Image: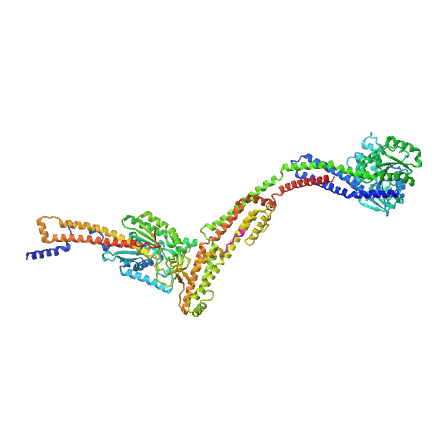
Amino acid sequence: VSDSFLSLLVQAARRRYAPTWTPPFRPAAQDAPRDADLVFRVSMLGPTKVGKTSIIAALLREAETSLLHMGVALEPFDLPTEQRIAEHRRAIAGLLYAGEFDPAAIRANIEEAVFRLRMSTGSAEVGIRFDLLDYPGGWLDPHRRGAENQEGWDECLRFMEQSTTLVIPVDAAVIMEAQLTRQKMSLPFILAPSEVRDIAARWAAARMQRAEEPAMVVFAPIKCESYFDDNGGLQNESGRLYQLVTRLYDEVREVIRLEAPHAKVFYAPVDTLGCVQLISARWLPNPVFPDVLECLPHFGIRPPGRVQPKGVDSVLFLICQQLAEARKRAAELILKARQEEADQASALAGRREGLLKEFLMRLTGEQELREEYRSKTSALVGVEIDKINKLNGVIDQLAARPLGARARQW
Amino acid sequence: LVDVNAQISAIVAVRHEQLPVIRERIDQWLRLDQQLAVLTVALAEAGERSIDRFTEARVSEARSSVAEMLERLRALEARFARSTVNVGVSGSARVGKSTVLQSITGLGDEQIPTGTGIPVTAVRSRIYHADHSRALVSLHTFDTFRRDVLEPLHLALTLAAVPAGVDEFRTWPYPATIEEHLGADAESAELAAQLTRLREIQQALPTFADDLTGGDREVPLADLRQYVAYPNAGERAAPGGARHRYLAVREVMIECPFPAAAVSRLGLVDLPGLGEADTNSDARHVANLRGDVDVVVMVLRPAEGIAYFGRPNIRTLELLKEVRGRAGSARDFVFLAVNDAAADRERLPGLRQSILQLANDNEPDKRFQVLTADAKDAGQVHDRIVAPVLGHLVERLPAMDREVRALALAEAKPVLERIGTTAAEIGTALRRSRPAQGVDGMLIGRARELRSQLALELRVILDDLRRQAEETAEDEEFVHTLETTFDEILEWIKGGFDEGTASWTKRAYLEMARADNASGFAAEELNYTRVDISRRFAALSDLFVVRVNAVWAAVATALRRNLGDLLGDREPSPENAEAVLRRLSGLLEEAEEPCPTLASAITGLLEVRIDYQSQLYPRVRSALSGLNQEVPNPATGEIVHQTSVPVSEQGAEQLLSAVSRLAEGAAHQAKRALLADSMAPSAVLFAAVEHFADLLIRSRESDSEFRQLARSYRDDIWPAEFHTIGQASARLNRLRNAVRSVSETVADLERAQ
């Protein structure tokens, strides 16, 4: 009976105390990031119509196939993201079906958009949430941005500064088709390398302040279908493309190297569709700045018109590697906090409090709560270790995969 | 005498045989004279300091010697050219010369006027036997009258000047008396007589001035007297006075049948007044007589006042000695004929005695054979004068001829030696002076300047081409042409390849249906399209032709600007530049001193060709390679079909779309390939002109060939510049040539001796 009574008392005390039971100290893991809060940021940095959204769509599509066998997945984390990507895919599919592909036909973004994505690692506990910022490329140009968009642009800038990864899409067709002096002179207006450099400088400076976090920039020439012969094209002008991109973005690279020496920089040309072929390109005066020429490429669809991206996997793997790395760094911080808390809990549970107090603690169930706390924190350490192990596995898997023939570290 | 005639004919024949040689010699000496004249002028013109001034004097002396030689040779020629043997008849006035001539020839007073007591014959006459009768009167001009008549008298009278014309002579203020002229002490009867004669001639001027016409005048023998004889008393007394036409006569040639046929091969020369005038006048007589007479019969008459062998006779003999020269002896040349007129017979011994003493050194016929005959007695004259004279001639003339000839030629030797030495001295001086150095030095300088200037101008052209070739700015004309061509190709594609899209698809469907597949037709159409596109881009060749021509024109303009008149007046243009450069290349090859490297530089430049076929097609072809039905996948190597459509009307439309797309893409690729090389034409032209400039300016041969060019076309390249210096050079060349000619002729003459 007494056991039963005592037991009932203890349970009552536990019921009474447990919901509000807190350890008699500030737990070390209290400030450690929680998984739900671990949202990494990736930013696209490029002018309007360069193909930022196309890359995002291509990355998601690529992930459907390339990551599958690794037990890794990349998927929309919320409905708006899913809708946005579906919309983009439909537009592309429509164009491909029509047999002609005019990039100008794809509507340019008019407001910033955050693609909320999640990278799963095969275990529900080790998913990686990341947000990918897409914004109207026109905002890059102060003339086009307009005062009404300044607030949005400031948010974008903050987002970019917090991003561990910058993807800089480069319109390969524009670079490659600019042959005449006036056309070449228009490239800085079209591709805005100076604005890109300025933002990259801010980003690099911010990265330097969080040097413990990984930092990566990927220069991704897109619409490369006509300049490589590894994906159905007949000509290989990849060397010239590399030279031209290097020349145009040399200052961007240089400012990153100076401001954030730890940042990794990659060159990864991609075919987002793979089945298009540049037929011709016209250069017409910009309606607002007549001295500036705009490139109007005309693409045809290569039979059989099936989307066949190339080089996107390199970007995808770089991003995933980068995310996994970042996630692991975060996990390690959590683990450290968890271990400290577990140590605190263990010390608390084993602490001698005097006979009376110990009696009372037993009587009130306090000791049992301490014991539970100890075992709980100890288990959490195990969980974190497990996550890190899993992330290590993912990282190793991603790292074991070659970068791709087109890409190179810059 | 008939025999004598035959012998004379033989002598004449022998003389004639020698004429060609003598005439050839005369030609040579004449040539030498002309060459010396040229040399004299050339020496004066050249003003060459290295030749001392005595040389000119020696050349002048040489000319005098040559003139003397020519005089001798001409005398020889005259002597040998005659078809008669000439006998001169000399003697003081009134000794009966004309009477002797009448007796010899059988002519009468009409032809040979005679008179008594006064001098009759005023003019030298030649009298020849002929079948016809005529008299040829050679008339003075005022100049010859002045020279032969006035000058000797003025000189003798020491009158300062000589009237220059008829009018001046007419009013010439002669002194009235010799005393007025020479002062009261002057007591010269001879000078007084000469002054009187001069005044008489002046007074008589109106009567003969009309006859001072020069030339020969044929007059009837009946009218001859007034031309040859002093007016007689009757004529002087006639109203208006006598005419003195003889004063206008130089000499007279009378041709008429000699009644005394035996002397038909004899020429008679009347020599009036020989020894009577002053020395200068006589000297000219001597010159005229050389070669003109073979022998002289000096007529003497023991008339009142002249019945002795006086001073005039001795002077005449001296003159005749000069006429004879060194050939033969006085005896061979002069006979003294005493007119044994009955009226004078008492004074005859005195004359003979004086002849013996004064002419023959007191030994009869020692120096001169003395003949005696009555001049009026033709028989006596023939027997005693003509016969011995002719006999002597027949005997001595051949030897005398040989001697005359040998002497004349022998006198040439020292003359030739002197001339040869003088010429050699001038030649040596010229060689020492290296007179061409000035021109050559200047020419070398100008050639160097020409080369530098051309280098500079070619550099400007090259800089221009280099800019075009190297600067980022593209060749706008090329780009424009290319864009235009591309746009035309696009239009052509959109328009259904000239055929129209409806027609194209209809034909495509029919062909596809016939073959039951699309690929054959597609392959053919793609091939046609590829060829057509390539052909359309080939139009760029026209632009290249324009470019090449423009560069040629620039180079030709630079060359022409620096080559003076060598390339003519026409400004080089792209249209004619090739012709101008070819012409220059030809000039360089055919120059007096050929310039093969410079010529090859130009021909090399002319060989530059930029054309679509050889330079651009390879690139375009590669760009057009996608315009094929089957293409290899570069990644896998597997053959890919570029078009795949169903055999249906819709398939035909799809095929048109596919072919159009491929055509546009290929044309775009071709345009890109061509634009990537838009600087190529400039680069090719730059390289060509650079190579040209290297060969022209910087080759090993350049320096020497520019000098050769300068020497070959000096006056074309620098027309004004070398004018003066060229003249100086030409003058020196003329001098050199003159010296060379003289030396050669001297050598010829020396060999001929």
Q: Which of B445 and B408 lies nearest the eye of the viewer?
A: B408
The number of callouts visible is 0
From this view, report whether residue B244 is shown above or below residue A267: above
From this view, report whether residue B46 is shown above or below residue B535: above
Q: Which of A289 and B751 lies nearest the eye of the viewer?
A: B751
Q: Which of A204 and B398 lies nearest the eye of the viewer?
A: B398
Instruction: From the top left corner, tell me how far across and down residue A362 is, in percent.
Output: 10, 52
Instruction: From the top left corner, tell me how far across and down residue B481 is, in percent.
Output: 48, 57
Structure colour scheme: rainbow
Furthest toward the top, the residue is B185
Quadrant location of the N terminus of chain A in the rendered image: bottom left
The dominant secondary structure in magenta is loop
From this view, report whether residue B555 is shown above or below residue B287: below
Instruction: From the top left corner, tell me how far across and down residue B594 is, in percent.
Output: 59, 47
- Image quadrant assignment for residue B233: top right
Residue B162 in view, yes or no: no
Furthest toward the left, the residue is A1
Residue B441 in view, yes or no: yes
Check residue B608 for magenta coloring. yes
Instruction: From the top left corner, tell me how far across and down residue B304 is, in percent.
Output: 91, 34
Q: Which portion, as a residue range, is magenta? A: B605-612
Q: In this view, does B472 lie to the left or right of A216?
A: right
Check residue B610 for magenta coloring. yes
